[in-house]
Amino acid sequence: MPTFALGPNQYGKAETRIVRVARGPGGDQLTDLNVSVSLRGDLAASHLTGDNSAVLPTDTQKNTVYAFAREHGIDDVESFATRLARHFVASQPSVHGARVTVEQYPWQPVDGAHTFRRDGGEVRTATVHHDAERTQVVSGVSGLVLLKTTDSEFHGFVKDAYTTLPETRDRILATSVNATWRHAGAAQDPYGTARAALMDAFAGTYSLALQQTLYAMGAAVLAACPGVVEVKLSLPNRHHFLVDLAPFGLDNPNEVYYAADRPYGLIEGTVRRDDDVAEEVVWSF
């Protein structure tokens, strides 16, 4: 008879949507989050025999998110995620590790009091892994769309029988930044500092390749944030191609482009401090 063994497993409540309004005399503050919780530990019995005596219901996890928002407030997503992760491990003997991932959707005040507008597709992120050995905090941003109209080239690349791409000494460079940065311990560096470093490096780097820009952006975050030890970036190249206007008797001195949404180049890389020992996340699926 074949024998089987239960491998790594986890469970939790995914994508709990919560909007918190902090009301005050100077106007309201709006925080809009999407929170996902995953737990690991001595939970095999639930899989193997249906014994749920060690299982904290996922509905309870959802309720905890709401209750903590009321009891403790939400100063920043890293602190909120850390508080939740530590609570689940400390309060449940059967839970040995918790992962809490938070997405924050930005809203900006319109009248300084009670009206807000939702910003574009940019999302702030934070993931906290906590167990008896350590607490790991990874912050990030996704969907941060950046574009520069010049100061970008691409030439000197390999050419073979299938190459049709012309070399260029002046092009539009555009991307949708997906970045995460790992803190040496509890998050200490302001999110805004890292975000500003990413944007400043993109704008200030005369780019000969998106790879070069990626490295400059990662290095800028490390330089601006002493508590960050590693930056991972995924940069899709949002291609903009010059339109051929010759059939209409018109020139095109780098003024009229069409934006191609796919296929696209995808440039990914990691920039870390020389003295940092690479540390993977504690666990993930």
Image (cartoon, rainbow, N blue to C red):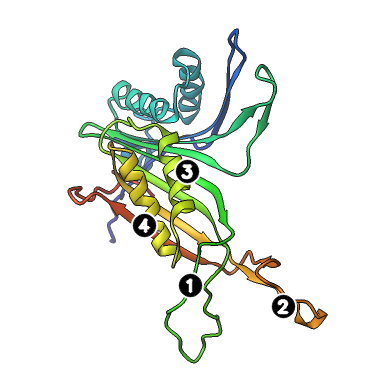
Q: Earlier in the sequence, mark 2 or mark 4?
A: 4
Q: Which residue is mark 4?
A: 215
Furthest residue toward right: 248
Spatial CA span between label 3 and label 2: 36 Å
| Mark 1 vs 3: CB contact within 8 A | no
Q: Quick one: SS at disc 1? A: loop
Task: Tell me if 33 is positioned left or right of 52 in this view.
Answer: right
Q: Amino acid at mark 3?
A: Val
Tag 1: residue type?
A: Phe
Q: Quadrant of the N terminus?
A: bottom left
Mark 1 or mark 3, earlier in chain: 3
Question: Which residue position is annotated with label 3?
Answer: 141
Q: Quick one: 190 or 88, which is closer to the camera?
A: 190
State the residue in front, 137 or 261. Answer: 261
- Circle 3 residues within 10 Å: few <14, some 14–19, many ≥20: many
Q: Tag 4: residue type?
A: Tyr
Point 56% across, 67% down: residue:
171
Badges 3 and 2: C-beta atoms under 8 Å apart? no
SS category of the residue bearing label 4: helix
Identify the residue position indicated by label 1 in the image. Answer: 154
Foreground tag (4 vs 3): 4
At numbered mark 3, what does the secondary structure look like: helix, strand or loop?
strand
Residue farthest to the left, as pictured: 275
Secondary structure under tag 2 reads: loop
Q: What residue would you read off at disc 2?
A: 244
CA distance separating discs 1 and 3: 27 Å
Residue visible at 51% across and 85% down in the picture: 163
256 in relation to 127, above or below: below
List x then y, in percent, for residue 254: 65, 69
Q: CA distance from mark 1 to mark 2?
A: 19 Å
